[in-house]
Image (spheres, helix red, strand yellow):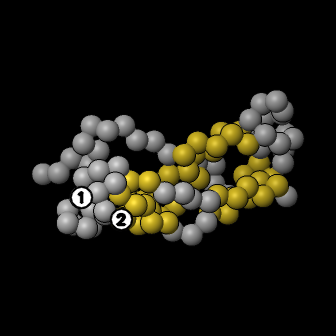
Amino acid sequence: MVQLSSGTPFSPAIFEVEANLGTVVSILNGPNITLTGSNGGSMLMQIGASSTGSPFITNVAPPGRTQVRIGGTLFVGSALANPGGNYSGTFMVTFIQE
C-alpha cells in the first residue's frame, strides 16, 4: 500500500479576485505542465476546475475579494520515472473580467 500524501500537507492554489460587485469573471487555464524533480524525475500536472466554476459572478464589493481555489491532477509514473524528492513547476491561469 502506498500512502498518497505520505503525511505531507497539500492544498489547491488560492487566488483572490477583486472586482466590482456583480462582475462576471471567466477563468482560462493554461496548458498541462511538467513538474521537474530534484532527483531527475518529472511528472505531468493537469490544471483542474475552479471552486467557483467559470464564468462566475463576484459576490463581494471592493476592498473585499472573491476567493478562487484551483487544484489539479498529477500523473505519477513508476518509482524509476518519479523518484522521491521535491517537484516544482509553473502554471498559468488567466482571469478575464467581462
The residue carrying mark 1 is 83
- The residue lying at 34 percent from left, 54 percent from top is 38
- The residue lying at 17 percent from left, 51 percent from top is 2
Whole-Å distance between the Cαs marked 2 and 1? Answer: 9 Å
Other residues around mark 1 within 10 Å, as few (<14) / some (14–19) / many (≥20): some
- The residue lying at 78 percent from left, 40 percent from top is 18
Quick check: 62 above or below 30?
above
The residue carrying mark 2 is 42
Q: Is residue 48 left or right of residue 74?
A: right
- Which quarter of the rendering shows the C terminus? bottom right
Question: For residue 19, which quarter of the picture?
Answer: top right
The number of numbered discs placed on residues in the rendered structure image is 2
Quick check: 83 above or below 52?
below
- The residue lying at 20 percent from left, 62 percent from top is 79
Judged from the image, the secondary structure of the residue bearing numbered disc 1 is loop
Which three-letter amino acid code belongs to the residue tagged 2?
Ser
Q: Is residue 98 left or right of residue 53?
A: right
Q: Is residue 59 left or right of residue 68?
A: right
